[in-house]
Amino acid sequence: MTNDALHDRDRKRVAKMLDYKAEVHHHTDKEIVICENRAYHMLLHQRTDALRACGNANWKKCTYCEKYDSPDNLRIRKNGEISHRKCKNEYNQMYRLRQQLKLIT
């Protein structure tokens, strides 16, 4: 039996024992984390991506420039948008210009 088949079989066996909302997060090929729900699973991915990209799992990625930065330097909105104030302002400025050009033509 291959490693992948064994891994799949083990994952299915564990999943049967878990609450239906639980998700399995593969930290490495040999390590898994049982997540209570999809939100926690996605949080693990976000923190892992940040750690790999900038060395700090607590940093967030700006929606507009896609650079990681400290949450102290970012605006985090209820709708999930995370941005530098400067990036958001530049985006809004360009959006307004595009709208004005549409009115002219």
Image (spheres, grey):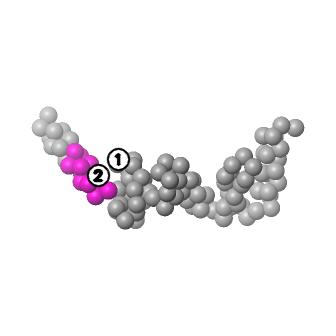
In the image shown, does 35 or 86 lie closer to the viewer? 86
Residue most extreme to the top: 105
Q: Earlier in the sequence, mark 1 or mark 2?
A: 1
Q: Name the residue that disc number 2 marks.
A: 87
The image shows residue 12 at horizontal and vertical percentages of 79, 51
Q: Residue 11 carries which label?
A: none
Residue 28 on the magenta segment? no
The image shows residue 95 at horizontal and vertical percentages of 23, 46
Query: Crowding near pointer 1: few (<14 within 10 Å), some, many (20+)?
Result: few
Mark 1 → mark 2, Cα distance in angstroms: 7 Å
Mark 1 and 2 residues: CB-CB less than 8 Å, in contact?
A: yes
Q: What SS does tag 1 mark?
A: loop
The answer to whether any part of residue 79 appears in the image is: no
Q: Give the range drawn in magenta.
A: 84-95
Quadrant (top left, top right, bottom left, bottom right) of the C terminus: top left
The vertical placement of 66 against 80, above or below, is: above
Could you tell me which residue is drawn at 44 percent across and 57 percent down? 60
Q: What SS does tag 2 mark?
A: helix
The image shows residue 79 at horizontal and vertical percentages of 40, 61
Query: Crowding near pointer 2: few (<14 within 10 Å), some, many (20+)?
Result: some
Could you tell me which residue is drawn at 83 percent across and 37 percent down? 2
Could you tell me which residue is drawn at 70 percent across and 60 percent down? 34
Quadrant (top left, top right, bottom left, bottom right) of the N terminus: top right
In the image shown, does 100 or 49 lie closer to the viewer? 49
Q: Is the magenta stretch mostly helix, strand or loop?
A: helix
- Under mark 1, the amino acid is Cys
- Under mark 2, the amino acid is Cys
Q: Which mark is residue 65?
A: 1
Count of numbered circles in the view: 2
Could you tell me which residue is drawn at 59 percent across and 62 percent down? 40
Residue most extreme to the left: 104
Residue most extreme to the front: 55
